[in-house]
Each structure stands twice: as structure tokens, then as C-alpha cells.
Amino acid sequence: MHNHGSAFPVESLFFIPAVVALVAYWAGARSPRSGRWPWYRTAFFTLGVAAVLVTVLNPLAELAHRDFAVLSFSHLLAGMLSPLLLVLSRPFTLALRTLDVFPARRLSRVLRSRFARFLSFPVTAALLNTGGMILMFRTGLLQAMQESMPVHWLVTFHLLAAGYLFTASIVGRDPSPHRAGYRLRAIVLVLSIAAHNILAKGIYADPPPGIPAAAAETGALVMYYGGGILELVLIVLLCRQWYASVRPRGKVASAIHPQ
């Protein structure tokens, strides 16, 4: 499947969905219907697509098969950084603004569906996200990833999808009729951070089968500190949104009951 000697590596096909996604987003951002779409959201989307794309292309994909630290770094790119950037780009908001009436209504129905509500519930999203990480590092899936590039691709897709669902459920700003309360989101975020840290420390103390201790320690440190930076960003974003949600009520109250 990897085609080392081929002039056209199979993994190059991933450029097709990446380019399609980028062109569609850029076209929407430049559409008059977008309402002066902020340039930084377009930058976030572009960087988010690039972050996950490099994890399935060489040289990073090949290095991840030989170096556990590189694999951990790929996990951060595909499962944490890329989802965060994509969520901040607000793709569904852009789509609902720029699509024609019929496809926009269909997308709106999908977002309001029970299945979307189930997947976007913070507890569900956290279980999919954390569970995927545990399976990746604590089962035979890790060895399968290192031996098979297609398995590596499938796991990367799960990391991206689960990471996006989790990030969107915590700090997403796209239209969502099923948005959970801030208190629940904060609790889920804290528990997810704890689970990620426990997993990283566990890998450091007890390397997965077939992983040398030195490589496991380096990879665990990449997960712990790199993940910590991205988790801190989530905390700041959530606190900022929470503060903004209660600030108007405080202003109204002070106007009604001046000191």
C-alpha cells in the first residue's frame, strides 16, 4: 500500500480531499454571503488541514512507524492541534451562510438531528476521544499501526474526527441547538485532561509492548507537555466564552440596581 518504489505514492491521494476542502472553504470565505469573513478563520482552517495532512504523508508518516516520539507528535497534530484549528475556523457557520437554501436546510437538519446531538454531547465526545487514545497506545492497535499504513490512516481519521467532536463540544462556536452548559463542559474538560495526563505518565512508567523505554519516555514527554499546551488553550477559550456569556447580565443588573 505504501509503494516505496512507485512514482505516485498511494498516500498522495490524500491531497485530493484536502485540496477540495480548502478550495470549498476559500470560495465560501470570499463569497459576498460570508459577510466579510475574518481572514484568521481562513488561516485556521488552512493550517488545520495542513496539520493533519502531514501526519499521513512522508516523511512524518514513515518516521512515525519507526520512532515512538514521532508517533506521539503525530497524535498531537491529528488529534489535538488540527481539531482545535478547524473548530476555530467555524466551517459550519460559513457553510450555512454561503450555501444555497436547499443544501443549507439539509445541513441544518443534520445539525439538529438526534445523532448529531448524541455525538456532540461532551461526555460522548470525550469518551470517543479518550477511548481512542487508550486503544491506540494500550492495545495491539499500536503495533498494527506501525506495521500497516492503512491502519495508520484509519486511526488518524478517528483521532481527527473524535478530536474535532470533543473540541467542538467544549469550545465550538458553530450553530448548535444542543449546546451543553458551561459547568458540564468544564467538568468534562478537566476529567479529559486528567485522563490524557494519566495515559502519558503510564506510558512513561510502563512502555507499550515492543517500545524501548527511552523512546517511550520521550514520546510520553511529548504527549504530556505538548498536550498540556493545547489543553491550556482550551481552558482559556472556555473560560473566555463562559465569562462573555454572563457579562451582559451583570451589566444589566448594575444598570437596574446602581450602587
Image (spheres, helix red, strand yellow):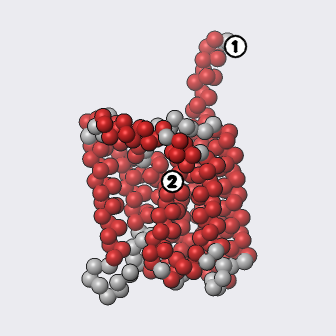
Q: Where in the figure is residue 108, as x and y percent of width and height?
A: 41, 38
Q: Where in the figure is residue 226, as x and y percent of width and height?
A: 58, 64
Say which residue appears at 61% left-offset and 51% top-offset.
124
Question: Which circle's residue, 2 or 1, is located before the other in the chain?
Answer: 2
Label number found at residue 259: 1
Query: Which picture quadrant has residue 214?
Result: bottom right
Say which residue appears at 29% left-offset and 85% top-offset.
6
Residue situated in front as seen by the camera: 24 or 245: 24
Vertical position of residue 175 compared to residue 119: above or below: above
Residue 78 in view in this figure: no
Query: Which picture quadrant has residue 97?
Result: top left
Location of the C terminus by quadrant is: top right
Label number found at residue 164: 2
Q: Where in the figure is residue 241, as x and y percent of width and height?
A: 57, 38
Say which residue appears at 69% left-offset and 63% top-offset.
197
Q: CA distance from mark 2 to mark 1?
A: 45 Å
The amino acid type found where label 2 is placed reads Tyr
Say which residue appears at 59% left-offset and 70% top-offset.
136
Query: Do the residues bearing badges 2 and 1 touch, measured as CB atoms within 8 Å?
Result: no
The amino acid type found where label 1 is placed reads Gln
Residue situated in front as seen by the camera: 244 or 123: 123
Indicate left or right for 238 with 52 as reference: right
Q: Where in the figure is residue 131, as x and y percent of width and height?
A: 63, 62
Location of the N terminus by quadrant is: bottom left
